Amino acid sequence: MRIADVFTASRVVASPIVVWLILSDELAAAYYLFAAAAITDLLDGYFARRSKKIASYGATFDGLADFALIFPTMFAIAVTGKGLWLLVVALIGIAFLILVLGLISRKKGSLTIPHIDTNLLAAFVYPTIMAHIINWQYAEILLLVTFLLLLFYASKYIAFVRSIYKLTNR
């Protein structure tokens, strides 16, 4: 197992613990564990690029680990009444949109789900979740900025699939 895979797997392991800490109202511990798990998202990419070994599962495993950390944590925060329903619905909508757009591109001849650089999005999603864990007074403003960024990325996915559709109709 590569070091990058260890960092990626650590997010999957941390997720249920973070959720349990949030539901147990141990918010400081949840905050720090979530922050540490978020940092592993940077580290796994760094070590994956540094090793120069291509693992066909690497990007998929990384994406699944991100979802495994982000969605349950956001849901736990939302359930405890600290907000984030807007982000939960938006991210689920984006995930559904990617699935539908992937199926459309498949129908047009190739299953192409674009990898749009989402580092900027992660730079907002992780802090937004962390701000809600500790109930920061400006968390809702950060949530609004993150939501607008999500809409921007959704438009990029739609534009990509539209370009595939136009290319295959010629």
Image (cartoon, rainbow, N blue to C red):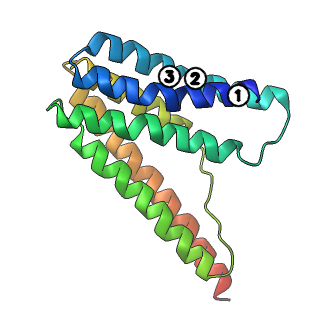
**Residue 165 appears in which quarter of the rendering?**
bottom right
Provide the secondary structure element on which disc 1 rests.
helix
Quarter holding the N terminus is top right
Q: Amino acid at mark 2?
A: Thr
- Residue 42 percent location from the top left of the image: 60, 25
Q: Are there few (<14), some (14-19), or many (20+) residues within 10 Å of tag 2?
A: some
Cα distance, mark 3 to mark 1?
A: 13 Å
Q: Which label belongs to residue 40?
A: 2
Callout 2 touching callout 3 (CB < 8 Å): yes
Q: Amino acid at mark 3?
A: Ala
Depth check: 14 or 163 in front?
A: 14
Can I make out residue 118 in this image? no
The residue beneath circle 1 is 4
Q: Earlier in the sequence, mark 3 or mark 1?
A: 1
Callout 3 touching callout 1 (CB < 8 Å): no
Q: Amino acid at mark 1?
A: Ala
The residue drawn where x is 66% and y is 44% is: 59
Provide the secondary structure element on which disc 3 rests.
helix
Q: Are there few (<14), some (14-19), or many (20+) residues within 10 Å of tag 3?
A: many
Residue sitting at the far bottom? 170
Provide the secondary structure element on which disc 2 rests.
helix
Depth check: 14 or 102 in front?
A: 14
Q: Are there few (<14), some (14-19), or many (20+) residues within 10 Å of tag 1?
A: many
The residue beneath circle 3 is 37
- Residue 139 percent location from the top left of the image: 24, 26
